[in-house]
Amino acid sequence: MRGTGPRLPVRPVDDDPRLAELYAKGLTGPDGSVLNIFGTLAHHPDLLRRWLVFASHVLSKSTLPARERELLILRTGWRCRSRYEFGQHVVIGREAGLTDDEIDAVTAGPEHPSWSDADRTLLLAADELHDHSAIGDLTWAALTEDWSTEQVLDLIATVGNYHLVAMFLNSTRVELDAGVPDVAMPAPGDPTAD
């Protein structure tokens, strides 16, 4: 289903007067160039501007700790087979305190024996949201023992946002940014991502 090469080029800042203001909001990489996801979504500047409000909450204003947020994003990226999303959040996850062993274990899911009960529950919630668009009763009960109502709602928002992001990335075939690890995603139907 997925071909190769981007479907949309990254828009340079001088393409549209609205882009300079958008790109100045921290949408660039270490070298100062716009990240490919944002340069691709810039084909619809109004959509990009409005989505950034919600995405900024999820990534930097959420009530979830960064490490746990990144577990949810990585699991969502893996389940959605989003190479860009998973690779980008390998980098961010490391900055948030995840080890390479934990990042590898994300691909195995909640069944991996290294997870604590709390981490296992987070990954299970991400899987249930992916598979059923809802958190089951047992998982909800386990989550609410450790997390506030706001944190559980932020968990749902995180997984939901990154499902949307995966749809953008996978459909437009956004290329990896420099410095982002290229992780091979399972092929459709491969049970390692299901």
Image (cartoon, grey):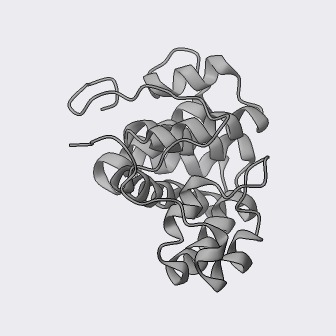
* Residue 60 in which image quadrant: bottom right
Camera-side residue of 177 and 147: 177
The furthest residue to the front? 14
Can see residue 103? Answer: yes
Q: Residue at x 62, y 40 (%)?
A: 89
Q: Is residue 191 above or below residue 134?
A: above
In this rendering, position of residue 185 left or right of residue 98 = left
In this rendering, position of residue 46 left or right of residue 3 = right
Residue 85 rendering spot, x and y as whole percentages:
52, 44
Q: Is residue 77 above or below residue 192?
A: below
The C terminus appears in which quarter of the rendering? top left
Q: Is residue 17 above or below residue 141?
A: below
Camera-side residue of 32 and 55: 32
Residue 30 rendering spot, x and y as whole percentages:
79, 47
Q: Residue at x 64, y 84 (%)?
A: 18
Residue 192 rendering spot, x and y as whole percentages:
33, 23
Residue 191 rendering spot, x and y as whole percentages:
26, 25
Q: Residue at x 71, y 29 (%)?
A: 98
- Number of labels in the image equals 0
Can see residue 157? Answer: no
* Residue 5 in which image quadrant: top left
The N terminus appears in which quarter of the rendering? top left
Camera-side residue of 13 and 144: 13
Camera-side residue of 31 and 182: 31
Q: Residue at x 63, y 42 (%)?
A: 70
